[in-house]
Image (cartoon, rainbow, N blue to C red):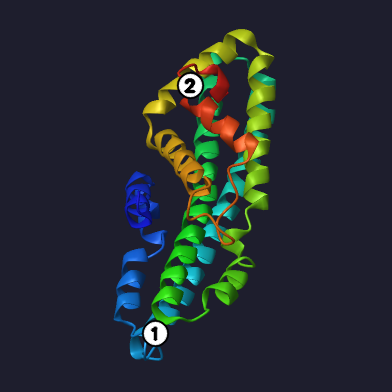
Amino acid sequence: MKFGKRLKRQIEESLPEWRDKFLCYKDLKKLVKLISATQPSSKAEAEFICLLNSEIDKFNAFFVDQEEEFIIRQMELQEWIKRRVAATSAAAEYARIGTEMVNLHGEMVLLVNYSSVNYTGLAKILKKYDKRTGGLLRLPFIEKVLEQPFFTTDLISKLVKECESTMDSMFPAAAAAATAAREEAVMVVEQRVFRNAVAALVTMRELRRGSSTYGHFSLPPLSSPDADLLQSLQLPSPIPIL
């Protein structure tokens, strides 16, 4: 599948409030077509560079805002668990906490995917630019991208793992309540966050899969933990979710 179509599909499958935060790949592609190979220094080229820089600023602002929100939400959930679970073993309480944890986990997976999709889009549009102009913009620009906040996913990946650990340790604590919580969490399959998280992981696997076009600027293959996570999310049983 062409990247433009894959990006369009990913945007459609993303959360509605995220859709204008992705790379304006189509607009960048139009500018590349306007740039002349014999006269690359043109208004179109200036607009292309300006839009690239603007897109990076957009990615960074959105990514950092979401990351900060997730840190706060995870801390609040941890406090909620300490207060409520210590005071009650009600199945309904476990169910509510479970639903919140699954939703938070799904949204964090979406943010990791957001980073991957936009990085890949930048690498691909820069490749088109270099091919069109005979220039060498991609290497220095990608080196700049690798230092941007939106590409630095160590913290959000850590939060994902912490969320998974919390779910793993919390729900076996009370068998009856845990069972009810798992049943409640299965209903999340019908909610947009869970569906979109699965779609995001599938996209990440596709983007990171080696191919004839795989090269120095490609993302590495999906790591084993992420691949295992994708498999667990696609299983019909609720147990791997929690």
Label 2: which residue? Answer: 235
Label 1: which residue? Answer: 45
Q: Quadrant of the C terminus?
A: top right
Q: Nearer the viewer, residue 229 or 159?
A: 229
Asked which secondary structure carries label 2, the reply is loop
Residue 50, position as x, y percentages in the image: 43, 81
Per the model, the C-alpha gap separating discs 1 and 2 is 47 Å
The residue located at (41%, 22%) in the rendering is 187
Residue 44, position as x, y percentages in the image: 34, 85
Q: Is residue 11 left or right of residue 177?
A: left
Q: Please identify the quarter of the rendering in which residue 43 is found.
A: bottom left
Q: Residue furthest front?
A: 212
Above or below, 147 against 36 in this view is: above
Above or below, 126 against 211 in this view is: below
Disc with the residue nearer the chain's start (1 vs 2): 1
Q: Nearer the viewer, residue 1 or 87?
A: 1
Q: Nearer the viewer, residue 238 or 181?
A: 238
Residue 225, position as x, y percentages in the image: 64, 35
Whether residues under marks 1 and 2 lie with C-beta atoms below 8 angstroms apart, the answer is no
Above or below, 163 against 176 in this view is: below
Front of the two marks 1 and 2 = 1
Asked which secondary structure carries label 1, the reply is helix
Amino acid on which the number 2 mark rests in the picture: Leu
Q: Is residue 181 left or right of residue 47?
A: right
Crowdedness near tag 2: few (<14), some (14–19) or many (≥20) residues, C-alpha within 10 Å: few
Residue 119, position as x, y percentages in the image: 51, 60
Q: Is residue 195 left or right of residue 82?
A: left
Amino acid on which the number 1 mark rests in the picture: Glu
Q: Residue furthest top?
A: 176
The residue located at (60%, 50%) in the rendering is 220
